[in-house]
Amino acid sequence: MPLMADPPGADRLSVRVRRNTVGAHDAAQRSGFLDAVSGGHLPWEAYADLTAQHWFMYEALESAATSMADDPVVATFLFPELRRLPSLEADLRFLYGPRWADHLFALPATTVYCTRLRDVAHRAATGFVAHQYTRYIGDLSGGQYLGPAIAQSYNLPAADGHRFFIFNGVDPMSFKTHYRALLDAAPWSLAEQDEFIREVAEAYRLNIAVLDELLSRWS
């Protein structure tokens, strides 16, 4: 039987990255830790720990955004409304109090994740966008379920303690459509596209390792 032809547009980068990383994406969404914390099956400290690990990840990512802002490709992917550090710090202040920074420490898996992110995101647009795509598009996808579920499970107020999941003024579906169009328009060679896709898969793998360590720590 002859192979079926790819549908029109199958060679677009936005299609290729989803097709080549769907397994890693689904594995992250099925994380036992995320299921446990969204269901309120772990102490609130476990959720606070997740928030702390997110702080380290986004500090690394958003620092790279600042240092790479002059790159013409990176510049097209910078959206101030996506920045998560202010929201994360507000959440940590609510969860831990005014001395929240004293409670932060990166798990070993988080340190590995951030080391990799800093290495590739400060070096090339493909590396930066790969980690930005993995984090922010994930936040605007599964994160939109996780936020309300966590707020309900831990009896959090309307916004306090879970601001990280709230993107004021951003429509997730419209934004993701726009972002995928930017990916398709990126002036990358096929080799650079492949490098981007490999780094997205690596970012998913590193994120799963953090979630696995959190599950082991709190189960």
Image: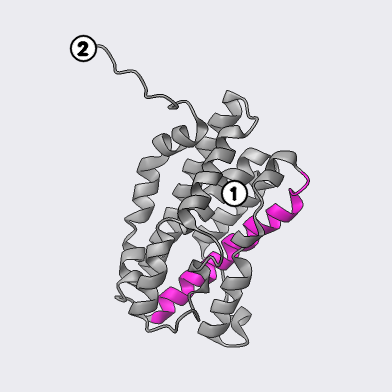
Q: Specify the quadrant of the image occupied by residue 111.
A: bottom right
Q: How much space separates mark 2 and mark 1, taking CA atoms? A: 43 Å
Q: How is the image coloured?
A: one colour
Q: Which residue matches tag 1?
A: 116
Indicate yes or no whether the magenta region holds residue 56.
Answer: yes
Q: Nearer the viewer, residue 142 or 55?
A: 142
Residue 185 image offset from top left, x and y in percent? 60, 33
Q: Which residues are magenta?
A: 44-70
Q: Give the position of the N terminus as an image quadrant.
A: top left
Q: Residue furthest top?
A: 2
Secondary structure under the numbered disc 2 in the rendered image: loop
Residue 24 image offset from top left, x and y in percent? 39, 45
Q: Residue furthest left?
A: 1
Assess disc 2: are there few (<14), some (14-19) or many (≥20) residues with their C-alpha within 10 Å of its C-alpha: few
The residue located at (41%, 75%) in the rendering is 46
Residue 103 appears anywhere in the view: no
Q: Nearer the viewer, residue 142 or 194?
A: 142
The residue located at (71%, 46%) in the rendering is 75
Q: Earlier in the sequence, mark 2 or mark 1?
A: 2
Say if 50 sits above or below 77 in the image. Answer: below
Residue 51 image offset from top left, x and y in percent? 50, 71
Say if 72 sits above or below 68 in the image. Answer: above
Helix, strand or loop for the magenta stretch, by majority: helix
Residue 193 image offset from top left, x and y in percent? 56, 31
Q: Which residue matches tag 2?
A: 1
* Amino acid marked by disc 1: Arg
Say if 92 sits above or below 127 in the image. Answer: below
